[in-house]
Image (cartoon, rainbow, N blue to C red):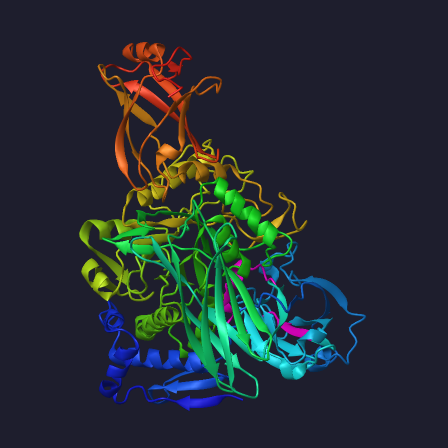
Amino acid sequence: MLRKTILRTNAKCISILPRLIAKESKAAYNRFTISVMNITKEQILLSNAVIDQQLSATDSFEAVHRSGEWKTVITPVFPHSLPADNIIDLSGEWSVKKWPFASTEEKLSSPRTSDASWEKAVQPGKLFALDPNVDPVTIPDWDRIKTLHLSPDDGAVIRRTVMVPDEWKDKEIFVDCDSIYPGGRIYINGHLVADHASGLTPICRNITALVKAGKPVTVAVRLYRNHPHIMMDMPRHSTDFGGMAQPVYIFAKEKCHIEDYYLPSILDESLKNGKLEGNVRLYNASKKKQKGTVTVKILDPNGVYLTEEAFPFEINQGQKLELPVSVKVNKPKLWNDEHPHLYQVELTAGIGGLGEDKYTFKTGFRRFEFKDCRAYLNGNPVKFRGVNHLSHHPKHGLHTPKDWLRRNLELMKLANVNCIRTHYMGPRYLAELCDEMGFYLVQELPIDWGTHYIHDPEWVGPALMRLYAGVCRDRNHPSIMIWAIGNENMPESDEVAENGWMHLNMYDRFVKRLDPNGVTMFPPPGPASKIEGILELRVGDVADIHYSFVPIKKFLSEGKVENPKSWTPTMEINTKEEALERGWNGTWFSSEYCLFNAYPDSIFSPETCSIIDDEYTKYPKDTPQIKVFYDRFKREWGFMRHEESCLGGTYFPWMSGGSSISLGHPFSWTILSEDCDWGVMTPELLPKPNFWVLRNLLCPVWFPDEIEWFEGDEGITFELWNQYNDRNLNECTVRITSRTSTLDWNDVKIDLAPGEKKVFTIPFWSNGDLRALKNGHDVNFRIWLIEPDGFVSTSKDITVFNGNRTRVEAGVTFDVSPEPAYIDKKK
């Protein structure tokens, strides 16, 4: 049953306003009143009221505002951090009964019903998927976006029985489902405990009253393949996946325990003083008042004890307590993509007469800030060289095993990628891997393609539930750099635009309530119909753009841009001054660019491979597609790379998902999840030819294609820009060889600080090369950039030509000669 709550937020606005300003800083309040979309005080009050209702909800209820004109169902979220011990992972073999059922789901979920004759399947994993041998257009009502072809009753009951340990007696016991895709109802020993219509975010419920220590517990999920709000969870990329996409856990905590914690690492401007600071939320389920201590112990990146602080507390029976916590760390080693130093935090709640409640997590100290329309990390400029990652395994579908995901990230590192934008909200361990391996994570929160619903209050409750669960799961990770709130959401018409933009602003405010240190961004739609592109700077901290760079180029030259209010479209002018006053930090990002059909066997396909391109180029039919990709990627990434106000971008995508006959063969017939075989990697992790283009152009240092030499010069002169975040180029080896041999080389030391540009002159290494240049011949050499650990981040062929003389006809060139060099290699 739904409980109905009516708040008349359109009454007494003036008297309520001071309390709201006190609750949130006046600067934060002003940030949303001075808005390009002219968000009103009434809308801010409504947003705050709805957010407060979501944060305080303990049961589902209908929130009603504007005298009944605005209604949404609020679903409670109970964030619980997973403990370090007393936890059982239910991954493994589950019993499966697929729909249609001969009995009710309640009976099928009960331990009294035998599942001995049921099918067996490993979960997490794929239970349902699109049959690649069935042409989707032959399926009645086929709709990959809304999944109208799938009955709301379709699905399965899946269950597993395990023993509850004897040691869990007198403890609070919970079930956590990290991802039921696209949704399901959870039963414990036949009792319904939750209905979770969100495929990508976790759900946790207290099941203490339904289980007994030393006895078996049957965990059952009535998986459904469709639900009214499935569009939020991006089924268009799922190939009709159905199943547990991530693990299910049951775990135990003490009667007085830590529910959740928000403990981000904070670094001051000097970069020498760090602290772990936030709050720990405790709950006392015992029958009396409790006294105890929360202890925070920190180990350095080598696992050596560093410091420890204790925080006493008192908490009444049945109460929750937000306990402030702050632990100083002096001169911490900093975290970034090049040196991802991590500290281990051990969090313990000790209560007299009860056992200890223990949690462990990794943290990293970093300072991410924006100054003068430029992004800085740890005091140096930073550029995100990213890819979109749509988690989709060739065999397991949306379940991406950790080892397979790690291999993806290892290959990304080899391609000079330092940033990932999730285009599904990734699994819990993706953020852990990004922390460990050094990736900047742009975590997308699931509100996808909301054109037809972003204005509708009915969808606000489901959106807030997703934001709440998603942010609380990952907000302590240093790798989380940006919360990408949804994807390509714009109101469908001017008539509903006001509500749509109010809701987007509400989501921005809500995420900042959950993670006050977080940075937000709202990825917009790309070019379509009469809209040539959108620079979304009306909401969020970082502006974003998809595919077309026409709007951002106009904005950079004119200080204003024309954006649509809706898909109608009525256009409006957004100025730089208005956006900065609203709260925009002056930087921009492209979370999708360079869409390219890259099936590896299509070697010559210049007319069909490049999609949504600002500068269409006509190529001869025998042009290799890798040439087309190189030209476009160099043009688009080169623009972002050289524009200082650009934080970076994420190429779309790393790989495309699909449903395959052989479930893993790299060249089998596959129905792709969306339109084309995009990306630089096959699902079996075989690099396509385009991978090497990505690797070459995402190198933090670009060397020129050609260098003009003039007679009288004692060397070759060129400009370099070091886009490493904290690595001086003098830590790397710059090695010069011929294009055809690595048997003789010369090493050059280049002193160039992170973020710095400088012109260098390198002396000639060969008398023969100098003679060739004087005679008008081109001289070719290869330059290698070798990082301190031996990784070659790029090798680049460079041509030097005489600017004073007519060049000898093409093809007559000289490679670097192995004659004695002017540079002393011993130096």
**27 relative to 65 in the view: left or right:** left
**476 relative to 686 in the view: left or right:** left
Q: Position of residue 489 (x, y in %)?
A: 39, 65
**273 relative to 228 in the view: left or right:** left
Q: Is residue 362 above or below residue 67?
A: above
Q: Is residue 164 visible?
A: no
State the image quarter where residue 587 is shown.
Answer: bottom left
- Compare residues 337 and 287 and report the one nearer the observer: 287
Q: Position of residue 301 (x, y in %)?
A: 48, 51
Q: Is residue 697 above or below residue 203?
A: above
Residue shown at the point (53%, 50%) measured from the top left: 656
- Compare residues 116 and 585 and report the one nearer the observer: 585
Residue shown at the point (49%, 62%) measured from the top left: 297
Q: Is residue 304 visible?
A: yes
Q: Position of residue 542 (x, y in %)?
A: 32, 58
- Compare residues 339 and 667 and report the one nearer the observer: 339
Span shown in magenta: 219-241
State the image quarter where residue 585 is shown.
Answer: bottom left
Look at the image and tell me in which quarter the C terminus lies: top left
Q: Is residue 563 above or below residue 72?
A: above
Count of picture labels? 0
**232 relative to 535 in the view: left or right:** right
